[in-house]
Image (spheres, helix red, strand yellow):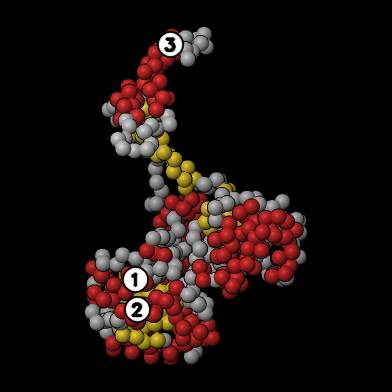
């Protein structure tokens, strides 16, 4: 890990290194991804089959593209009952947490005769992308599906890549079964995103796409945004631990490694006011990396994106935390709740040394789909809000409109725009509205209405 003493130059250098991991800096891959997206848009199933054979070494057809109920059942039964029980408990935790996020429609009637409100409706068709290979986590399946279920989405479509034998990760299918999702397609990568965005003969077009993925998936989501909505363009995983002298070095070291082992571009950062803690954590990390199962990945990520930043005081430390705006933030200080009140930017905040980041990733309930690469300054974790739409409701009576018509029609002195386009319509309504209304009431049965 790279140890630095915090000053203006060092924090700028760290931020510059971290931002290089952003999908906005993947220009070298963009032309390839955009080519895939355009091919699928034009070629439909045939293009999806071609790219699946090329990248996943499996020959897809219209007959085998969809995961069957038998395959789902076999995957579910292949997993130990103990692991299934844990996933079921995690599902309930996630569901319970997201049910607290549900918004209600509202209508408010005012004394002037106007009625204003907001109607909440779920997005109808949602596409969920679940990675395969080393990034296949059942928890990701649950985290992306559950808020859509709680929001009331009518149709949830999942895409996930097959292996060379046409099999889908068993944990992914088991998690989908627990969540109640049955419409699953054996398609991965940029071709899956394009298929859900534009629709093919086999895969329906959706209204929104959510879910993590590699560089190709991230850029594909970026490319199709506008044709469909997306959750975010996620970058590599990251963790930041804010700690003082009360933290336990081996706990901090383990938590930093829990994210650094995800991939070579993951970042792990310790910001501390204690130099002795900084040195102890570096020593602990080096010792543990030597015997880690993912030693190669850890060495690459920590050598480039692993930082130990020593601050002169807690104020400087917190300022650095807010500048970095990490995906995961652990606060291990004497009074973590008090420290938290000064933090403005973080995706998920873990308080105290017994609230480790993996707890949130897999089990606790809050969503682990979080803003990365500093976007926690303006983005939030995936939630029920991502799967709903809000429609404004406006209803004015004749009397209410008459009271405000002159205000809306009023000309602005010195402005080139001296008249609102619908002024004549407002005048007509406010002048003749009551007469029309009375006439209509009288002639309801005959079907005649005065115009």
What whole-number distance in Å separates the C-alpha atoms at marks 1 and 3? 65 Å
Horizontal and vertical percent for residue 6?
30, 82
Q: Are marks 2 and 1 in contact (CB under 8 Å)?
A: yes
Q: Is residue 403 visible?
A: yes
Q: Examine the rendered structure and indicate whether residue 400 appears above or below residue 128.
A: above
Residue 362: % across, % down: 46, 67
Q: Residue at x 32, y 32 (%)?
A: 411
Which of pointers 3 and 2 lies earlier in the amino acid sequence?
A: 2
Give the labeled residue for mark 2: 11
Please name the residue that numbered disc 3 is placed on: 439
Q: Quadrant of residue 407?
A: top left
Task: Label 3: state its secondary structure.
Answer: helix
* Secondary element type, mark 2: helix
Q: Nearer the viewer, residue 449 or 410?
A: 410
Q: Is residue 226 above or below residue 187?
A: above
* Residue 116 on image: x %, y %: 36, 34
Residue at position x 34%, y 38% from top? 415
Q: Pointer 1: what residue?
A: 323
The residue carrying pointer 3 sits among few (fewer than 14), some (14 to 19) or many (20 or more) residues within 10 Å by Cα, namely: some
Residue 349 in the figure: left or right of residue 128? left
Give above or below for 265 relative to 232. Answer: below
Considering only order in the chain, which callout, 1 or 2, is on the residue closer to the N terminus?
2
Disc 2 crowd, CA 10 A, few/some/many (<14, 14-19, 20+): some
Q: Is residue 317 above or below residue 369?
A: below
Q: How many marks?
A: 3
Disc 1: CA contacts within 10 A as few (<14), some (14-19) or many (>=20): some
């Amino acid at each position: 890990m790279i140890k630095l003493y915090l000053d203006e130059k060092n924090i700028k250098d760290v931020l510059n290194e971290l931002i290089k991991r952003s999908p906005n800096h993947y220009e070298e891959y963009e032309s390839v991804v955009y080519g895939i997206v355009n091919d699928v848009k034009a070629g439909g199933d045939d293009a999806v089959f071609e790219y699946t054979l090329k990248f996943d070494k499996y020959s897809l057809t219209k007959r085998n593209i969809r995961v069957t109920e038998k395959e789902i059942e076999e995957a579910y039964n292949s997993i130990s009952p103990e692991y299934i029980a844990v996933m079921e408990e995690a599902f309930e935790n996630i569901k319970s947490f997201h049910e607290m996020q549900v918004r209600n429609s509202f209508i408010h009637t005012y004394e002037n005769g106007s009625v204003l409100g907001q109607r909440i409706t779920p997005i109808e068709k949602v596409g969920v992308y679940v990675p395969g290979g080393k990034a296949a986590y059942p928890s990701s399946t649950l985290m992306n599906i559950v808020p859509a279920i709680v929001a009331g989405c009518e149709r949830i479509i999942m895409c996930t890549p097959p292996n060379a034998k046409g099999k889908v990760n068993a944990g992914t299918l088991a998690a989908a079964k627990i969540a109640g999702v049955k419409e699953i397609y054996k398609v991965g990568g940029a071709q899956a995103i394009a298929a859900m965005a534009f629709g093919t003969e086999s895969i329906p077009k959706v209204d929104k796409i959510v879910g993590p993925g590699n560089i190709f998936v991230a850029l594909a989501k970026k490319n199709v945004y506008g044709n469909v909505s997306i959750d975010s363009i996620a970058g590599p995983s990251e963790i930041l631990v804010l700690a003082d002298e009360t933290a336990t070095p081996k706990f901090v070291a383990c938590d930093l490694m829990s994210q650094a082992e995800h991939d070579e571009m993951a970042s792990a950062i310790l910001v501390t006011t204690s130099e002795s803690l900084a040195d102890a954590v570096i020593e602990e990390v080096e010792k543990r990396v030597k015997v880690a199962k993912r030693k190669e990945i850890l060495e690459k990520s920590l050598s480039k994106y692993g930082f130990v930043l020593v601050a002169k005081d807690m104020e400087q430390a917190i300022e650095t935390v807010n500048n970095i705006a990490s995906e995961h933030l652990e606060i291990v200080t004497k009074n973590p709740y008090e420290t938290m009140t000064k933090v403005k930017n973080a995706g998920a905040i873990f308080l105290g040394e017994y609230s480790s980041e993996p707890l949130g990733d897999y089990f606790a309930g809050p969503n682990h789909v979080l803003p990365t690469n500093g976007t926690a300054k303006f983005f939030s974790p995936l939630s029920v809000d991502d799967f709903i739409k809000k429609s404004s409701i406006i209803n004015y009576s004749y009397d209410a409109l008459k009271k405000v018509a002159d205000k809306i029609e009023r000309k602005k002195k010195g402005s080139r725009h001296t008249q609102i386009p619908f002024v004549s319509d407002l005048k007509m309504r406010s002048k003749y509205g009551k007469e029309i209304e009375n006439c209509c009431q009288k002639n309801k049965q005959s079907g005649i209405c005065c115009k």
